[in-house]
Image (cartoon, rainbow, N blue to C red):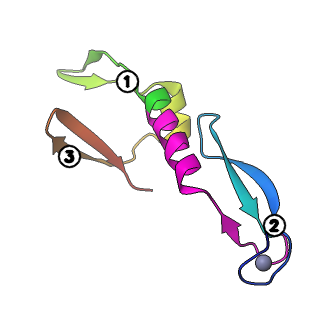
Amino acid sequence: MKCQQCKTNLEEIKFDIGYGINVESKHCKKCGFNVTDDKKMKTALIAFKKQSAKEVRVVRIGTGLGIRFPNEVVKGLKLKKGMDVLLMPEEKGLKIICES
Ligand SMILES: [Zn+2]
């Protein structure tokens, strides 16, 4: 397979999308062009979501309640103390959105 942009032969690479999940992709060394198969990407994303779903316990923090983020989540999302996250109501709970 050749690069769509510069016609150089593409090389097979695997890139880490986090949590040790790799996606196979084709990469052009010359111009940096990447081709990723949609199915492979979807499969990897499903694996990623399953693997990254964690059960956490609600704990008391001062006079209120809170949850503790597991270390993998902290690393995966690059969470830092003092960071603001957005809590979004969802059909079955809350979505935590981190913008860095
Ligand atoms: Zn190229």
Region in magenta = 29-49
Viewed as shown, does residue 52 lie left or right of 97? right
Q: Nearer the viewer, mark 2 or mark 1?
A: 2
Q: Nearer the viewer, mark 1 or mark 3?
A: 3
Compare residues 98 and 11 and report the one nearer the observer: 11
Is 10 magenta? The answer is no
Q: Are marks 1 and 3 in contact (CB under 8 Å)?
A: no
Residue 35 % position (x, y): 66, 65
For the point 39% across and 47% down, the residue is 83
Give amino acid for label 3.
Met
For the point 44% across and 35% down, the residue is 49
Q: Which residue is mark 1?
A: 68
Q: Which residue is mark 2?
A: 10
Judge: label 2 CB < 8 Å from ligand 1: yes
Judge: label 3 CB < 8 Å from ligand 1: no
Residue 17 % position (x, y): 60, 46
Viewed as shown, does residue 95 lie left or right of 8? left
Viewed as shown, does residue 56 lie left or right of 29? left
For the point 60% across and 56% down, the residue is 37
Q: CA distance from mark 2 to mark 3?
A: 41 Å
Residue 70 % position (x, y): 46, 24
Neighbours of disc 2 within 10 Å: few (<14), some (14-19), many (20+): many
Neighbours of disc 1 within 10 Å: few (<14), some (14-19), many (20+): few
Compare residues 56 and 62 and report the one nearer the observer: 56
In the picture, the quarter occupied by the N terminus is bottom right
